[in-house]
Amino acid sequence: MKRSKKFLTSLGVLVLAMTIFSSNALAAESVIDNDPLSTAPGYHDYEGNWVHKSGGYNNDHRLISSSGLADASYMWIHKTLKNKVVAYHVYLANANFTNPKTAYQLGQTGTLVYVNQDTARSGWNHIGTVSDYTNSPFFLVINGVMSSKTGSTGADAMKVTY
């Protein structure tokens, strides 16, 4: 009985220590929608014929057909965040987002991540984490040239955690 009690006490201490020391190092977050308020931490820009639609994060999103994607891009830019380790997330919660290979460029690093918008889970999707110490603002781009020309590509909101 003493041995069992000692084991349970040790196990309890271990669980407590793991809880304390396993806190997420990326604790702060910023969301940039495609119609950000003036108080938002960033803004968006785009090239191409993105169509404004209702539904999605803050009840709006942008959509472009595969035929218009070759010359298109969609960018979210964080105005002040620099020199950090940042995790990128995109909001994908729309049945019209059907591109099976959407190319996202993660900031200045130029890292491309391909996301199947047709099968992605509904809501926030983590697409990559980068360390960028170039003293440039963080941004995320849907790269139309590198994306599949199949289905429709959607752009809604971007979130960074840092």
Image (spheres, rainbow, N blue to C red):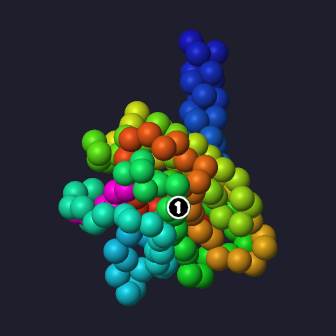
From the viewer's perspective, is 135 left or right of 63?
A: right
Where, quadrant-wise, is the N terminus in this rendering? Answer: top right
**Residue 61, magenta (yes or no):** yes
The amino acid at mark 1 is Asp
Position above or below: 146 against 162: above
Is most of the magenta stretch helix, strand or loop? strand
Residue shown at 50% from the left, 62% from the top: 72
From the viewer's perspective, is 154 left or right of 147?
A: left
Give the x, y percent position of residue 12.
Answer: 57, 33
**SS for tag 1?**
helix
Magenta span: 59-64
Where does label 1 land, which residue?
Answer: 71
**Residue 142, magenta (yes or no):** no
Residue shown at 71% from the left, 77% from the top: 136
From the viewer's perspective, is 59 left or right of 76?
A: left
Q: Residues within 10 Å of mark 1 (few under 14, many from 20)?
A: few
**Where, by quadrant of the figure, is residue 98 drawn?**
top left
Extreme-top residue of the structure:
1
Front residue of 45/15: it is 45
Give the x, y percent position of residue 42.
Answer: 49, 78
Where, quadrant-wise, is the C terminus in this rendering? Answer: bottom right
Position above or below: 83 against 107: below
Q: Is residue 20 visible?
A: no
Extreme-front residue of the structure:
67
